[in-house]
Amino acid sequence: MLDIMHKANLMKCQVDAKLCALRSFITFLSVCTGTSSYKKFGLPGGGISITTTQSAVRCACKSLQSAVDSLPPEVDNSGVLFPPLSGQVELLLTITRILLDHAKQSKSSRHLYPVIVLLMKTSGASTSFLFNLMPSSPALKQPVKSLLVLLLSLFEFIYKKVDMKDGSEDVNIFGELSLLSMSLLPVLCKLAESREYFDLAIASMDIILKGFLPSNVWVPILQKHFRLQVILQKCQSGALLCTQVILNFLLTMGRTKDGAKILQSANIFAFIKVLLSQMSLDDSCLRNSLSTQTKDVKIWGLGLAIVSSLNHCMDDDISRNSVANSTISFLSGQVPLMSSYLSAQSVNTHQSKKRTLLQKSQTSLSALSLTENILTLLCILAKYHFPRDTGMKEVDSELREIIIHLLAFISRGSERTGDSPNWNLSFGCPPIIKEEMKLNEEPPLIRSKYGWFRFAASCTLSTPSVSGPPNAGLSLVIRDKNPADSDSMKQTRFTEMLAVQIYRIAFLIMKFLCSQAKEAVRRAEELEFLDLAHFPELPMPDILHGLQDQVVSIVTEVLEANVSTALNTETERVCQLLLVILETSLYMELCVSQSCGIRPVMGRFEDFSKGIKAMVHASEKHSSFKPLVRSLAQITTLLYPGIVQNNNLM
């Protein structure tokens, strides 16, 4: 008996010694390679080579798989076997971080894809096995959590690799990863109900839904294994942390029709309404760029984005009226906040120069995206005659004034106005997150030197010495600089994304104002006279002209540059967006001119005629634009009678 006890103690000492050595080695690797919080000092010879790292990953995967396979189905609660297993998982996680760091520094990481697949297989299988043992073995919580961190790191890395679907070999690898993701999704659904794993599991599920599985695959899995109603109730009660993580996941679900139906059946509108009521959002925190409630604003923005995506996905579904009614009910208490947010983007341009300089601040792509979501929801409200039918006429009028002010600001980005020394680009939008900084190093795709594609380059220049933190919106700032400097600014994919985002906002503004004008015309037909006292605020023709000039210049330039080649998908989509903006602005100009009796601007006919003719001529080689050009010809004929015949527009 004593001999048996001696051998057992000896084995325990050996295990403890190996575990101590393993943890020391992990700490050493973390410090030397900079994967810990300690300062990186580097190893002799330039650190660990990529070949050595790949070999270490394979060895660690094999060792972990052997350790997991050796665990009996029923494990005692002593936890003797689990500390070494936890150490092996930590070692694999540390080596994986070194591998991913190598991949980020190299131009191509295709040679690492087989190792990534091995890591996914090992970590996924280990997570599934240990998850089944957890109820009887609480000591497994830490290794499972480390495995989830490892899986999330791998998912994030692969999701950013757009080249994985290019070659036939890469397609096979991606298909294998998709199968692994599908087998892992049910386990993640169960882990998401636990407070310890909620954020990691939901974040991994979010990436799986975005980039690895189509909706017809993940929807049945979620319906069977994911108790969404339970998750939402726990979020409302505060039993789960990281509300922003679950909202991002719900937004991903809501961007597909099947996912939107799941959210609707889970009464998502009530959940968001209760969630937002628990936050201390008010008018001042939305207007004040120095507000400490930035997190609450982000959550509010995600809630609005989810509502917006549901309306978009369910627009052609039989339940769209139910979604619209729920949206109107939800937004009835959000209109004042939405108005405050938009007004924060419209600082009074009549302020003195010194005062304006003191208010320098910057916006971000996420803030502009929130502006887009707000305008999308306002278009939904306008479609169903809200807030006119709910006693919100004052807010309605204020919103139109704010929106027209934003449109006027956007329209001033025309080439002619931009060359004037009296106007300079008046807000900053530098890249903030890593993905944006990377995009700011990539070459442009659309390559236009007109409108906001030209001026967005100077918006990305950060001036931290005078600028405050990112503002909730667009801060109007006057700067003394040579307007010719904008030509020398570097155009990148990020600056183009900024320009496109601004034009998406312009499109929604025009859509909202057109719906207001259409409602006013309908009301005039009912009354049989035009009631100017209750006529909605609409933009002046000069605002619309600035927007029209931008569109004509940009589309003409892009089409002429690609006269012998087909446009890429993104460039074609942007041109179509711009042409729709042009068409709606012409209809708006016709409405304003006829309703208010405004005479045509001197020389406008000649300038517009020349520009539109060049644009139509450039579009002849691109058949996809024919329907839009034909529609443009119709409204142009109404606004400028005779222009079609005089200039051979069609």
Image: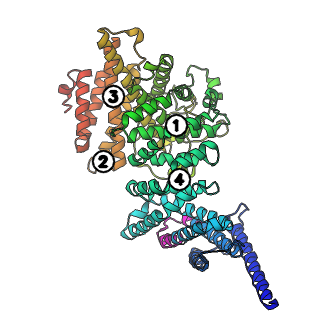
Which mark is in front, 3 or 4? 3
Q: Earlier in the sequence, mark 4 or mark 2?
A: 4
Disc number for residue 270: 1
Cβ atoms under marks 1 and 2 closer than 8 Å:
no
Nearest the camera: 34 or 297? 297
Which mark is in front, 1 or 4? 1
Task: Indicate the position of residue 391 as horizontal and vertical percent values.
Answer: 48, 17
Which mark is in front, 1 or 2? 1
Q: Distance between the Cα atoms at labels 4 and 2?
A: 27 Å
Task: Indicate the position of residue 640 as horizontal and vertical percent values.
Answer: 25, 21
On screen, residue 269 above or below 476: below
Which element is circle 1 on? Answer: helix
Disc number for residue 438: 4
Q: Which residue is mark 2?
A: 562
Magenta-drawn segment: 101-119
Task: Indicate the position of residue 309 as horizontal and vertical percent values.
Answer: 44, 41
Q: Amino acid at mark 4?
A: Lys
Q: Which residue is mark 3?
A: 584
Q: Earlier in the sequence, mark 3 or mark 2?
A: 2
Q: Earlier in the sequence, mark 1 or mark 2?
A: 1
Q: Amino acid at mark 1?
A: Ala
Which element is circle 2 on? Answer: loop
